[in-house]
Image (cartoon, grey):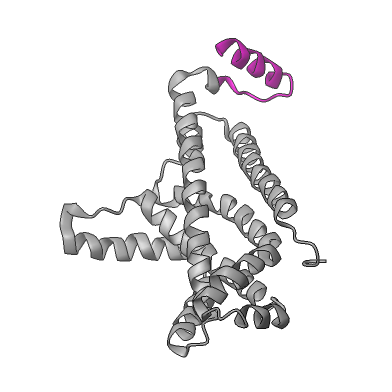
Amino acid sequence: MNHWLELFVHWAAGFGLNYGFVLDSYQRGTLEQGALTTVLLCLFTIAGSLLAGVGLAAMLTSGKAWLATPARIFVEVTRNTPTLVQLYCAFLVLNMLLTQAVGAANPLTPFAWVVIVISLHKGAFHAEALRAGIEAVPSVTLEAASSLAFSSRQLLWNVQLPLALRFALPSLINNLIDLVKMTAVASAIAVGDITYAAIMIWTQSDNVLELMILILSFFGLLSFIVNCVGRYLEARLRMPGYGH
């Protein structure tokens, strides 16, 4: 492993880039832990945002004002305010109030707050994409399902959502790619993601350019993986007669 790292450091030096810090076990370990934390953030927020999106979409299309109105207010407020501001409000205000209420028993760590805030934020965008997909389901399809005595709930879960997911998949993938990049805000509240790890390293040495290239490449790779998975799902879930 060290041999390959030494070759990389030597190769990068030919371009005037000093990656010597990766040979230091402590700094390399800090970056590796930061990369793992970022991957975990992505996995948890992807799952959380999709669950939130489905729930909000179901509320928006329920036809019941007492469900649709709160969901619409939440979506509009969430979509139209910055994620970083939402994170600060949650961590510096709600977390403080929770800590005052339960003391040291507060179960929500900074990592958990990032997952909650980003999941709800992107869930609002997912909800709009799914709502559009639900409303795009042909009326003749709904009529056919209704003729089989499907209840409203069965209609939503067995007919509308499966089709809406296919219609909304390109928008959902775009949202998830944006979500991957959004996890970088975790560094604002000292969550040890790869951005925070890089900041800790470049405050001790003059490697800002090298670390920025490393961070950009890492997030580019994660976004590319999400994009590839999305394209695979689009091809796998494509239904003849729909979406063309």
Where does the magenta region start and end?
A: 1-20
Against 85, is 22 above or below? above
Q: Can residue 52 be seen at all in this image of the molecule?
A: yes
Q: Nearer the viewer, residue 53 or 156?
A: 156
Q: Is residue 105 above or below residue 1?
A: below
Q: Looking at the image, which residue sits at the far top?
A: 3
Q: Main secondary structure of the magenta part?
A: helix
Q: Residue at x 66, y 75 (%)?
A: 132
Rendered-image quadrant of the N terminus:
top right
Please state the horizontal and vertical placement of residue 17, each as a whole percent of the image.
67, 25
Horizontal side of 112 relative to 128 (left or right) equals left
Q: Nearer the viewer, residue 16 or 172?
A: 172
Residue in view at x 69 percent, y 76 percent: 137
Which residue appears farthest toward the right when viewing the image? 244
13 with respect to 26 (left or right)? right
- 181 vs 242, left or right, is left
